[in-house]
Amino acid sequence: MSEQPKVRTTEGVVQGRRRQGHAVFRGIPYAQPPVGALRFAAPAPPHRWEGTRQAVEFGPVVPLSLPIDVPPQGTDWLTLNVGTPDPGAAGLPVLVWIPVGGYLSAASSDPMYDPAALAEAGVVVVTINCRVGAEGFAFLDDVPPNRGFLDQIAALEWVQRNIAGFGGDPGRVTVGGVSAGAGSVAALLTMKSARGLFRRAIAHSVPGLHSTPALGRQVTAAFADRLGSAAPTAEVLRDIDPWRLAAELTSFNAGLHAHRENWGRLTEAGTALCPVVDGEVLPETPWPALTGARASGTELLVGHARDEFRYFSVVSGRYGTFTEEDAHAALELQAPQPDGARAYRAAFPQAGPEELVETVYSDALFRMPSQKLAEANAAAGGTSYLFELCWVAPALGGILGACHSLDVPLAFGTLDSPVGTQLIGEEPTPEAVALSRELQEAWVRFVTTGDAGWSAHRPGGHLTRVLDTESKTLPYPEQASRQIWEGHFPAPFDLS
């Protein structure tokens, strides 16, 4: 049996293992555990170690604020994993994947992000853990805001220091993510502290989840009050067990509708503690920053699914039940003001309540933030490649449609992962395998050359790759929605 691979990092030697023709290194710390005095602080540089550190197990999962039972693990949350075709190689393209969902979960150990297929194609894949929920985004008076973003920057700095030892090129780093991970990518595009840490970006289903400082402060104060704290400070919250804090946030999120009168659109987001446009860590939201030339464009591969909201309506049990009252509330809350509700009804005159709810939520939550990020990046001098996934997930008789997150197991080639089988089925069809290969090849080409393989999305043409059984490059398919949102950026949630 061949010797297991070793790499010397700036902190010490790590030993991984060989697997399916590539090498994997897991649970490498890129910062110190954010506990004790470091809890709610900016990430601190990792400790050095003597000898060889075994890097064969994933690091502990960060505390998750989800309605699932995840047992508490260790506290060394700020770790990353590297999958590489060959640690002895040089100059390979690098993909750093941010597996954040809803700013509530971050599990780089999810089999959906297995690097095997991409490593086989010649890409070094880094997946990271970072703080989410209250640990990462509670807006506290006495510590830095948006600590989850600061963690991501620390991980990217680790990549710059160390990825050459794993065969990667620090000058050819692509940062990527889906959903809140894509929101993280969009934020990184505009943050001064992230400049120079990556060259390209992949963003699937970008959300417009940001709060103003006024709302962020009030929400965090209400959450702290729920915990019996007189003030929303790290000094007080440090005494609360991290997993208990995460569970309390899960319960708090479940009751957001009670605050609709004061907190407006935030109450429909599913997460109370999202990134705050604080003016320092995150100076402003990405769309005006890029459009206004306060941030530079880059090579960007961005896209969304056609039926983004369908997954959430099915999982919540609401699919097929939406009423005219639901449609009215959705349009009034989510459509751009002041005339968006009227514009949706005019643009979709034959749509019933179900279609109107799904359309406006898909637009407001993911489709328009993604499309507008492509436009804004191009306006800032970058090159944007836009896609829309229209292939219908075969599972559950196809009722999921082309839903949120379906594109991720396709791109990673992890059709047999739990999420992959949930959406695609136990036995992937030939069409699923072919589409997976197509999207994966687009990723590999993009991280390698900066070209996704189809025409760029530019003002006027709005060319988009429509991914389906027979994929085509066409004008943007959601033109009616794009016109409704013309002149409107995804605005931060604010006090009503």
Image: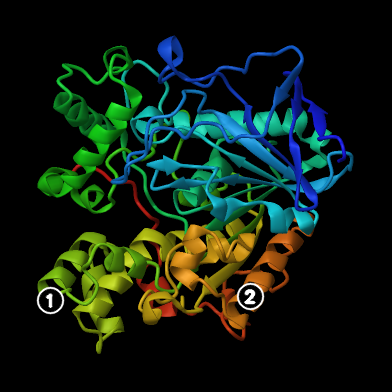
Identify the residue shown where x is 23% and y is 77%.
354
Please give left or right for residue 227 compared with residue 294 in the image.
Answer: left
Which is nearer the eye, 141 or 163?
A: 163
Q: Residues under labels 1 and 2: Cα distance?
A: 39 Å
Q: Which residue is mark 2?
A: 433
Q: Which mark is residue 324?
A: 1
Above or below: residue 460 compared with residue 441: below
Please give left or right for residue 302 compared with residue 132 in the image.
Answer: right
Please give left or right for residue 45 compared with residue 312 in the image.
Answer: right
Q: Secondary structure at mark 2?
A: helix
Q: Position of residue 348 (x, y in %)?
A: 29, 84
Which is nearer the eye, 263 or 151?
A: 151
Crowdedness of circle 2 by 10 Å Cα count: few (<14), some, many (20+)?
A: few
Labels 1, 2: front one: 2
The residue sitting at the front extreme is 1
Identify the residue shown where x is 39% and y is 33%.
63
Above or below: residue 309 compared with residue 76: below
Q: Position of residue 277 (x, y in %)?
A: 39, 37
Q: Which mark is residue 430?
A: none
Identify the residue shown where x is 28% and y is 67%.
313
Crowdedness of circle 1 by 10 Å Cα count: few (<14), some, many (20+)?
A: few
Q: Is residue 473 visible?
A: no
Q: Disc 2 residue type? A: Val
Identify the residue shown where x is 55% and y is 75%.
427
Residue 443: image quadrant is bottom right
Residue 11: image quadrant is top right
Q: Position of residue 391 (x, y in %)?
A: 51, 79
Q: Position of residue 237 (x, y in %)?
A: 28, 18
Q: Earlier in the sequence, mark 1 or mark 2?
A: 1
Residue 220: image quadrant is top left
